[in-house]
Amino acid sequence: MAVVLAFAVVLFAAVLVSEIAHRTVLSTAVLFLVAGFVLGDGVLGFIPLSQGTETVRQLAEFALFAVLFTDGMRLNFKQLRTQWRLPGRALGIGMPITFALIALLAHYLVGLNWLEAFLIAAVLSPTDPVFAAALVSREKVPQRVRHLLNVESGLNDGLALPVVLVLLALAANESPHPAALAGELALGIAVGVGLSYLAIVVQRLPLLSATARYGPLGAFAIGLAVLGLCSLTHANMFLGAFTAGVTIATASEETKAAFDHFGELVAELLKLAALLVFGAVMSPAFLADIPLSGWVFAVLVLVLARPVALLTALVGSDLGRDERLAVAWFGPKGFASVVYGLLVLHSGLAASNEVFHLVALAIAISILAHSSTDILIVRRFESAAGSGGSGGSAAGAGGGSSAADPSRPDAFGRDGEQR
């Protein structure tokens, strides 16, 4: 119950400072991370958790599932068909370059062998929709930038997972089973699309209708069913979550609209709880175990690997300079990498503890950096728009539609702007 009490107190504090956080570089995400660090075993000892605690893994997985589900609802299949070029560049060109650069840094800077270097690269290559939402939800940011970041962060987790599993199998001298991995991913998509579409069809049967009070629970029930069925069938629940959200947004605008506010609240609460627990894992002793080369590595993952990869991937696109720089910088690491890092930690590999330490440090630095700079990016676009600059254009052949996304409320009731 100590965790519950700590979460309640920090959550109330976040509510009280949310107006300030909305206008400044202060971030509620950083507040929960720092609070977890101070309340954890290494400082005050109020939250007795360690990196191997099952609570850490479960909260990270639930938070990632919830946010992928709600982020999927911000898209629909028609939009994906007409606006795939920029996300395709980020995923097809930017992600492999990011992978290669991180692996090079891990091998030559930290001293990991090539297999371990490839493994940590696979863990840290995906961006995280939990923290990308801080920028994606702001309507002052050009629509095609928000669309690119949203689709990229929603899909790259599923792309990285099979690579992580194959590399883990190779590191453990096991024979990887590509067919089994492909089946797990395909089954996740099938469950997400099939179960969600079936539920929408049932909702439309004659004599069946939901009241305004129970309407938001429809999509919530679908999400829970997808989670449960994926767990029972060993389907990839993260792909299931995202494809379920996209299916609902495509097949039933009414269900999506009813769920929007409620879903954002659920996802936000899970995110903040997971941040508190993750912060508790990051004790002073944990950080002291990381050598200087590890700190340099974690910083370069953010300021070198991602920017170089995305700027390369976007060469020749119609994005303006400010748009390219925003996309290149804003590649937050988060719960996807936490979940994959925990898979490595519990794998029994000789270097599993070292790899997890580096992953956790990169995630913590990313949370601090990206959660505090989204407002600066927004202000940059506001300034460019006010002066007639080129950085905030939302039109162009590479970016698809220029229509702004509908606003969505955040956990503290501010339309379209989440801190």
Image (tube, rainbow, N blue to C red):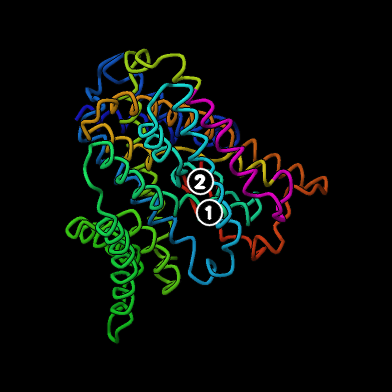
| Residue 308 on the magenta span | yes
- Residue displayed at 56% across by 38% down: 306
Which residue is disc 2 drawn over?
96
In this picture, is 190 found above or below 122? below
Q: Residue at x 54, y 43 (%)?
A: 97
Look at label 1 and name its amino acid.
Answer: Gly
Q: Extreme left residue here?
A: 232
Local secondary structure at mark 1? helix
Question: Which residue corresponds to the image point at 40% horizontal and 65% vertical from the top-left?
Answer: 258
At label 2, the amino acid type is Pro
Left or right: where 176 falls relative to 70: left
What crowding class fits label 1: few (fewer than 14 Cα within 10 Å), some (14-19), or many (20 or more)?
Answer: few
* Residue 181 location (% of width, % of height): 28, 55
Apparent side of residue 334 relative to residue 152 in the rendered image (left or right): left
Residue toward you, 110 or 91:
110
Along the line of sight, which residue is nearer the eye, 22 or 112?
Answer: 112
Q: Where in the figure is residue 138, as x and y percent of width and height?
A: 59, 49
Nearest to the observer: residue 321 or residue 258? 321
Rendered location of residue 152, percent (x, y):
50, 52
Quarter the N terminus occupies: top left
Q: Residues within 10 Å of mark 2 (few under 14, many from 20)?
A: some
Magenta range: 297-322
Question: Is any atom of residue 274 visible in this view?
Answer: yes
Q: Is residue 416 in view from this perspective? A: no
* Disc sitting over residue 92 in the figure: 1
